[in-house]
Image (cartoon, helix red, strand yellow):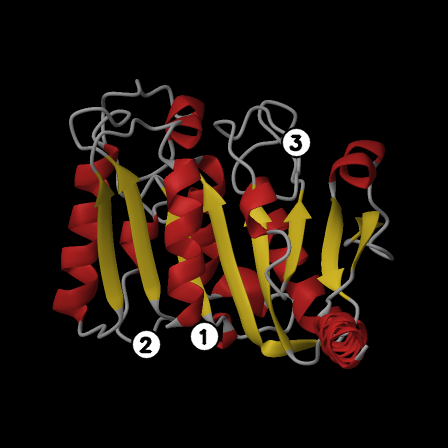
Amino acid sequence: MKLFSLFLFVFSVHLAFGQTGKVSYKTETNISYRGGEGPDKYMKDRCRLDIYFPENVDSFITVVWFHGGGLTEGEKFIPERLKDQKMAVVAANYRLSPMVQSPAFVDDAAAAVAWVFKNIGKYGGDPKKIVVAGHSAGGYLTAMIGLDKHYLASYGIDANSIFKLVPFSGQMITHFVVRKEKGMPNTQPLIDEFAPLFHVRADAPPLYLITGDRELEMLGRYEENAYMARMMKVSGHKQTRLYELDGFDHGGMAEPAFDLLLKILKE
């Protein structure tokens, strides 16, 4: 009987601690991040976000996630690998080419991030711990709004307030959709005001550049990121890191990159 009673006591304590430590999550979907701006129907339909957040965690980190799709397709989603990590994930849609011209999609990304800065505190998040990340086109948007300060400034946010920037295989020269608008082919490089590389600066938020294998990546994507890393360091930026995921192509690099992102968040 004594052994049985001891077993019940240990079990009840374990259960109690398990319940205390359990984190529950909630998701809210299709929140407009451009309310009050008199949006047209397309803007109203596309400029929405989903938020996945822990209900009983204080001052959590938030990752704002932008999907890929070449700025011509794609839909917001909460990455499975980022769930159940005691942090929030905000997945935002943005307008797409050819329905809009550059830089409308960059401005949408900035508006979405500004919404997070202004509202995450209501959910229990810390506005000083907002990380911006995305894959491919989403990586391009991440770098653009983090480095060209005027996009977020137009919404009253200092881009330097971003905790960390983590673009996955993002284009660092002018995006090929923007070059297409100018009549240029994918293989002709350009660095103008629509290129993250144009905006290298020493005072930018910490920048973590992740790409796939240089021999498997799309259109020299590794080399673009390597040049970005070099120029950021030359500019005096002290917190730029470059990662190459050997053996993974442009699409396949995202899954291992999520594990790397989680590691970066703990640094």
Distance from disc 3 to disc 2, alpha carbons, whole Å, reads 32 Å
Query: What residue do we see at 23% from left, 31% from top?
Result: 189
Cα–Cα gap, marks 3 and 1: 27 Å
Q: Earlier in the sequence, mark 3 or mark 1?
A: 3
Left or right of 22 in this view: 62: left
Residue drawn where x is 58% and y is 26% of the image = 97
Which residue extends farthest front?
Answer: 1
Q: Quadrant of the N terminus?
A: bottom right
- Asked if residue 193 is positioned above or below residue 231 in the image, the reply reads above
For the residue labelled by badge 3, is the local secondary structure a helix, a strand or a loop? loop
Position of the C terminus by quadrant: bottom left
Picture coordinates of residue 106, whole percent (x, y): 54, 47
**Residue 124 can be seen, yes or no:** yes
**Callouts 1 and 2 close, C-beta under 8 Å:** yes
Q: Is residue 21 left or right of residue 26?
A: left
Q: Residue at x 22, y 75 (%)?
A: 238
- In the rendered image, residue 86, in percent from the top left (x then y), is placed at 63, 66
Amino acid type, residue under disc 2 in the picture: Asp
Q: Secondary structure at mark 1?
A: helix
Percent of width and height locating residue 242: 22, 54
Which residue is under mark 1? 160
Q: Which residue is mark 3?
A: 75
Above or below: residue 3 compared with residue 226: below
Residue at the spot of label 2: 203
First reached walking from the N terminus: tag 1 or tag 2: 1
